[in-house]
């Protein structure tokens, strides 16, 4: 099975990484922050040439952000989720624009929505929100209902 | 055209013009815009009522706010509304501009549109059916006949109220950014 | 020549959807283009964290108003995957039928938009009129013309009404007849070919490296389709082609969409012919107390615009911890559009954007 | 003398009614082609009445209004110089040359107004308009030259007079090549569908009209209506023998207008460079050939 080969290759190549075959066509790789750019280059060289998305999850209890790079290989038909965690207090990651050009847009959104800084991304300007004051809205400690109450004065509308 | 209609035309040709020539500003503000193309095209054909989409706000006199209004869109809506010529009519389309609709707890959509610009009529529902737009248009005709569609006059009379609300949510708009401009009204 | 800054949208006839492009224009040529999204941002992903799994269904379909069913399908698939729900075979078939109907109505909407932006009202009026046959069927199916909320965890909300299959076949026959009219009027029109051939070309390598999927990728010669690569619903049971064009320009993208219409009709016919008996849905636990086991999943389907995926994380409560939507218009509407508009004529800005089949609400979410 | 004065007032009014009727008819016919019911035929009249009653909130300066007035005045004066079925209030001997100059007045007025509007869309629209004017002038002037050489006159009245008699005497048959060339550039001159580049709403937000609203838009609409009348009437006078009376003149105009409209309903818009190439290719070649033929055979 091809998934198992990838799992072994990843675990052999990257220190402190774990790979898990979730089901057919899905593989989850967990890496330390430092080896993430190298892993992306490694995966791209191995046929994972389509970056589907970069998503970010706010784990408030662990005080960490989790970046997930979703890669897809057209030839092997395997979807790889490459996960890396960065601390919430100093959210800095390395930009993956050199590997995947269109990561620029995803990183721009994550910067706006979570406040994660990407070193090497020249275009971390606001994308969706105009003149936004306050914390990045997708963080778990930002309560949208509280915000609506304060900003629009809509107490009676809250259910 | 019956005799009563002709009498009305002779009495006030301007009302006749305002009623049967509602040119809508082409502005897709929200997802309600998906029902506008069917209304304009072959099945419902709004042109037989004189309703046409127009390219720029200066040419239009009806403003359909089709769906939710995000903060960024609100700035564009206010700018567009200010550019339209009098008399102008605003119709809120869908439940989102009425009270926020299903986005009642969204941080980026405004909840009550008529706090920021005057609205002459609402079409409730999500999505309202195309027939509802025609009912709104005929209601608007009745309101024009009875001099009840006076949103643009309200805007001028209560400009301070509207301006205060607009500035509360959009302090960065060029309209409000410079202090000498903020004194107007 | 003086360089002008031209705001193309959001209030502009050449703009389909609430979206903005800031163009730097020299004469009739675009020097630089910057996408300006955010006019439709509602913060869906945030709102979903505040609602229970079932309450989210009215939200997800509103991510893309032109093509709402793939979003429901995705969300239902993710919930099923996390909760371990099974879908009966009849449910799979009905889902395929609904998804293809949605694809047809989205493509017909696209024909309206594309014709309109090329200044060709007649084809747009016809296509939009024919789209209503399918919207009427949707209305019969679930009561709504635009938003359906028909696909549900464990299957679909209710079985097909009696006689629905015949009426759907009649609508497909009607559309097939009309497609030849569209060909005569529009797709074989010389001016259409002259305006679109060679405009905004993409090579296959560029397309893959920029994250393009769906019809835009297939117009560059790569025949990738999630329906074939990772079959979901009942797609593994049907015989259909994936239309591919080689040039990757505006013309190829248009023709691929045109060819997909016929494939969708064929899939609907096969699904109706093979429709198995049995229940259309499996029972869902009480949605108010429905806690889903901790876990994560990524599911993907082929929407009318390309690969659409959802990444869902559950922490064991009755609300999703994180939902992330990967939408096909996201890469095309931002970086790809900016690249393709560089050096284009101002006359072509609108139709390049429409040829990429960009849906603004998908970008903003 | 008094009759002439009356005609000076009546003719523009008649031209206005014909043009509005054409507009209404075109919207109705287009609607039917697009499987719609369509607006009432008098809908353009309602639109103009509405536009006139709208109030301006802001001012674009005096040049803006002056430009629009100039554009409209240019078109109205052109109407007076074109014989309409035996009625020709202002036609003296050299009027064809006057018409050519007068027809340029309205684009100039538009350009003035667009310049005063300070809108990039407006200036782009005006530049497109002038490029198009340059493009269609070549075949159009060549055709006119052929007509003038053939009839040895620059007077429209004499040109019409020379075509009287039976159908065989019409310019369409005597001078078929210039007639075909002019018909090919007729959509460009009218600014209808394949060539409505100057005011394309999907590209440059209706171009020169982008800042027009209320009275100014009404002026622009009137100017457009008069322009339609001028172009179609000129074609009828040049190649279809004018008209014995106003009715036959009107019928001929209707035929020409409908022919143009039906072609325009089934074509998408072209780009400006394609329009330029189109005008300078076949229509110019045909017109040149026509002129050479006339010079060789002569009368």
Image (cartoon, coloured by chain):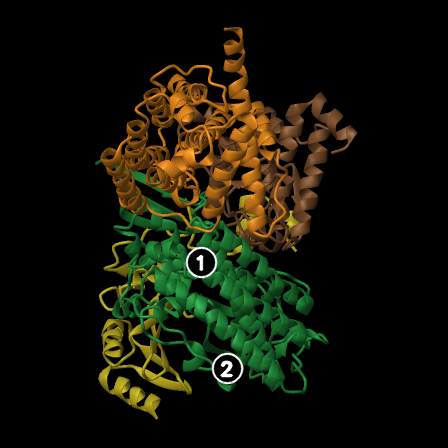
- Asked whether, in this view, residue C88 is left or right of residue A49, the answer is right
Residue placed under numbered mark 2 in the picture: C235
- Asked whether the residues under the numbered discs 2 and 1 touch, taking CB atoms below 8 Å apart as contact, a structural biologist would say no
SS assignment at label 2: helix
Q: Which chain is orange?
A: D
- Chain B's colour? brown
The subunit carrying tag 2 is: C
- Chain A's colour? yellow
Indicate the position of residue A52 as horizontal and vertical percent values. 36, 70
Asked where in the image residue B137 lies, by quadrant, the reply is top right
Q: Residue at x 63, y 30 (%)?
A: B18
In the image, residue B151 above or below residue B183: below
Indicate the position of residue B67 as horizontal and vertical percent values. 57, 49
Q: Quadrant of the image for the N terminus of chain C? A: top left
Pointer 2 and pointer 1 on the same chain: yes
Residue placed under numbered mark 1 in the picture: C186
Question: Viewer-proximal residue, B124 or A3?
Answer: B124
Residue C49 in sight: no
Q: Which chain is green?
A: C
Q: Residue at x 40, y 57 (%)?
A: C189
Indicate the position of residue C302 as horizontal and vertical percent values. 45, 73
Task: Tell which tag, 2 or 1, sits nearer the viewer.
Answer: 1
Q: CA distance from mark 2 to mark 1?
A: 31 Å
Q: Residue at x 54, y 53 (%)?
A: C125
């Amino acid at each position: 099975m091809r998934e198992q080969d990838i799992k072994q290759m990843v675990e052999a190549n990257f220190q402190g990484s774990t790979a898990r075959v979730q089901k057919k066509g899905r593989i989850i790789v967990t890496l330390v922050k430092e080896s993430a750019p190298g892993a992306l280059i490694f995966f791209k060289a191995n046929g994972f040439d389509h970056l589907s998305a970069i998503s970010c999850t706010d784990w408030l209890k662990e005080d960490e952000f989790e970046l997930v790079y979703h890669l897809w290989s057209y030839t092997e038909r395997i979807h790889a989720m490459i996960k890396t965690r960065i601390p919430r207090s100093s959210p800095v990651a390395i930009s993956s624009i050199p590997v995947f050009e269109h990561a620029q847009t995803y990183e721009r959104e994550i910067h706006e929505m979570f406040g994660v800084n990407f070193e090497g991304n020249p275009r971390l300007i606001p994308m969706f929100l105009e003149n936004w004051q306050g914390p990045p809205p997708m963080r778990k400690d930002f309560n949208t209902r509280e915000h609506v109450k304060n900003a629009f004065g809509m107490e009676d509308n809250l259910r | 055209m019956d005799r009563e209609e002709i009498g009305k035309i002779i009495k006030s040709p301007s009302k006749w013009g305002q009623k049967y020539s509602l040119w809508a500003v082409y502005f897709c503000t929200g997802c309600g815009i998906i029902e506008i193309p069917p209304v304009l095209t072959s099945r419902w054909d709004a042109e037989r009522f004189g309703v046409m989409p127009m390219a720029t706000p200066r040419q239009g006199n009806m403003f359909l706010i089709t769906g939710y209004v995000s903060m960024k869109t609100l700035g564009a809506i206010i700018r567009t509304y200010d550019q339209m010529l009098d008399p102008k009519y605003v119709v809120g389309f869908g439940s989102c501009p009425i009270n926020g609709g299903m986005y009642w707890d969204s941080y980026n959509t405004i909840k009550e549109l008529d706090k920021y610009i005057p609205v002459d009529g609402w079409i409730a529902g999500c999505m309202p059916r195309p027939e509802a737009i025609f009912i709104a248009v005929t209601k608007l005709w009745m309101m024009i006949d009875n001099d009840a569609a006076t949103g643009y006059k309200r805007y001028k009379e209560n400009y301070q109220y509207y301006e205060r609300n607009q500035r509360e949510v959009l302090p960065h708009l060029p309209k409000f950014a410079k202090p000498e401009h903020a004194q107007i009204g | 020549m003086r360089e002008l800054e031209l705001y193309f949208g959001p209030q502009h006839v050449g703009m389909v959807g609430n979206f903005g492009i800031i163009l730097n224009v020299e004469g009739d040529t675009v020097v630089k283009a910057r996408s300006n999204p955010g006019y439709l941002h509602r913060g869906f992903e945030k709102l979903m964290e505040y609602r229970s799994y079932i309450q989210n269904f009215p939200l997800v379909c509103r991510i893309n108003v032109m093509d709402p069913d793939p979003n429901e399908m995705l969300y239902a698939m993710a919930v099923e995957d996390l909760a371990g729900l099974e879908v009966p075979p009849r449910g799979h078939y009905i889902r395929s039928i609904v998804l293809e109907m949605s694809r047809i109505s989205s493509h017909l909407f696209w024909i309206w938009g594309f014709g309109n932006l090329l200044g060709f009202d007649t084809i747009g009026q016809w296509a939009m009129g024919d789209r209503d046959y399918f919207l009427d069927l949707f209305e019969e199916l679930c009561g709504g013309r635009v938003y359906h909320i028909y696909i549900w965890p464990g299957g679909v909300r209710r079985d097909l009404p009696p006689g629905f299959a015949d009426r759907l076949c009649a609508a497909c026959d009607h559309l097939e007849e009309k497609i030849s009219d569209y060909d005569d009027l529009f797709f074989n029109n010389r001016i259409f070919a002259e305006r679109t051939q060679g405009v905004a070309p993409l090579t296959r390598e560029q397309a893959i490296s920029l994250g393009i999927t769906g019809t835009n990728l297939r117009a560059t010669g790569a025949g990738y389709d999630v329906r074939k690569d990772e079959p979901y619903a009942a797609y593994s049971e049907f015989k259909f082609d994936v239309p591919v064009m080689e040039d990757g320009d505006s013309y190829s993208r248009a023709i691929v969409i045109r060819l997909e219409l016929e494939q969708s009709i064929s899939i609907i016919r096969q699904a109706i012919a093979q429709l198995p008996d049995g229940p259309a849905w499996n029972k869902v636990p009480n949605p108010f107390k429905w806690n889903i086991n901790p876990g994560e999943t990524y599911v993907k389907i082929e929407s009318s615009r390309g690969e659409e995926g959802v990444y869902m994380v559950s922490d064991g409560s009755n609300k999703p911890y994180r939902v992330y939507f990967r939408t096909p218009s996201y890469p095309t509407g931002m970086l790809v559009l900016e690249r393709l508009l560089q050096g284009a004529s101002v006359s072509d800005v609108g139709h390049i954007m429409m040829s990429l089949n960009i849906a603004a609400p998908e970008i903003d979410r | 003398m008094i009759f002439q004065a009356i005609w000076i007032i009546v003719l523009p009014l008649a031209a206005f009614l014909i043009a509005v009727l054409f507009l209404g008819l075109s919207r109705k016919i287009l609607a039917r082609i697009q499987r719609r019911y369509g607006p009432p035929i008098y809908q353009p009249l309602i639109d103009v009445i509405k536009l006139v009653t709208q109030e301006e909130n802001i001012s674009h300066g005096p040049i803006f209004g002056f430009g629009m007035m100039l554009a409209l005045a240019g078109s109205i004066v052109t109407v007076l110089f074109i014989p309409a079925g035996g009625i020709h209030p202002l036609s003296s001997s050299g009027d064809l040359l006057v018409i050519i100059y007068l027809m340029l007045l309205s684009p100039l007025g538009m350009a003035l107004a667009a310049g005063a509007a300070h809108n990039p869309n407006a200036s782009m629209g005006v530049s497109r308009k002038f490029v198009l004017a340059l493009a269609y002038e070549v075949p159009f002037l060549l055709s006119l030259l052929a007509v003038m050489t053939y009839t040895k006159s620059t007077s429209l009245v004499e040109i019409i007079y020379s075509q009287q008699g039976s159908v065989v005497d019409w310019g369409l048959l005597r001078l078929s090549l210039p007639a075909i060339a002019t018909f090919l550039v007729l959509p460009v001159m009218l600014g209808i569908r394949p060539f409505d580049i100057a005011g394309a709403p999907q590209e440059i937000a209706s171009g020169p009209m982008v800042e027009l609203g209320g009275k100014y838009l009404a002026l622009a609409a009137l100017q457009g209506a008069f322009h339609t009348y001028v172009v179609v009437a000129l074609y009828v006078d040049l190649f279809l023998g004018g008209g014995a009376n106003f009715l036959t003149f009107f019928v001929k105009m209707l035929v020409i207008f409908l022919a143009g409209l039906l072609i325009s309903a089934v074509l998408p818009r072209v780009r400006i460079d394609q329009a330029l190439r189109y005008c300078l290719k076949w229509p110019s070649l045909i017109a040149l050939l026509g002129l050479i033929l006339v010079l060789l055979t002569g009368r």
